[in-house]
Amino acid sequence: MNCPFCHIHNLIVENELATTFYDSHPLNQGHLLIITKRHVSTIFDATPQERLAIFSLLDICKSLLDLAFEPNGYNIGMNCGEAAGQTVSHLHIHLIPRYAGDMESLKGGIRGLIRRDGGIYGLSNQDKQRVPMTGTSFST
């Protein structure tokens, strides 16, 4: 299996069934992914225990991002299946910190953050390349 998420090494937080890492193409500073350790394609393929593990890490990661970056809000998202826009066929949840003024209009939530040309409003090329706290890990 050639899954990029099955070979991630810069983990942030993990538990027995799930783990987290910063997105390599962040939409905002602190954007991270929460995945199952077992390779499954979507949330619908995960066991009830894996779902609990994922959402447990969601709460922990939110607290860590609050301390590290002091965002003003969050977008939480998941695409299930290619038709829904899933590009990596491994269950993952996006936790995207949002900051006051990171886009002109809040209408439309995350859709408003991404420009039509594929760029990201309010994020410089230098910021997009930066992956904060790389290599930091915690166990729960």
Image: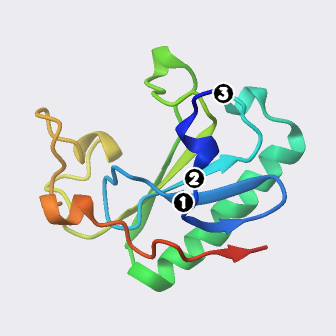
Q: Residue at x 58, y 59 (%)?
A: 9
**Amino acid residing under circle 2:** Ile
Q: Are marks 2 and 3 in contact (CB under 8 Å)?
A: no
Q: CA distance from mark 1 to mark 3?
A: 18 Å
Q: Secondary structure at mark 3?
A: loop
Q: CA distance from mark 2 to mark 1?
A: 8 Å
Residue lying at the far top in this picture: please name it: 83
Q: Residue at x 88, y 46 (%)?
A: 49
Lower position in the chain sequence, tag 2 or tag 1: 2
Lower position in the chain sequence, tag 1 or tag 3: 1
42 above or below 48? above
Q: Using the image, tell me which numbered label, if any, was put on residue 8.
A: 2
**Amino acid residing under circle 1:** Phe
Using the rendered view, name the quadrant where residue 38 is placed: top right
Q: Position of residue 106 (x, y in %)?
A: 25, 53
**Amino acid residing under circle 3:** Ser
Q: Is residue 54 left or right of residue 126?
A: right
Q: Are marks 2 and 1 in contact (CB under 8 Å)?
A: yes
* Residue ID for mark 3: 41
121 above or below 82? below
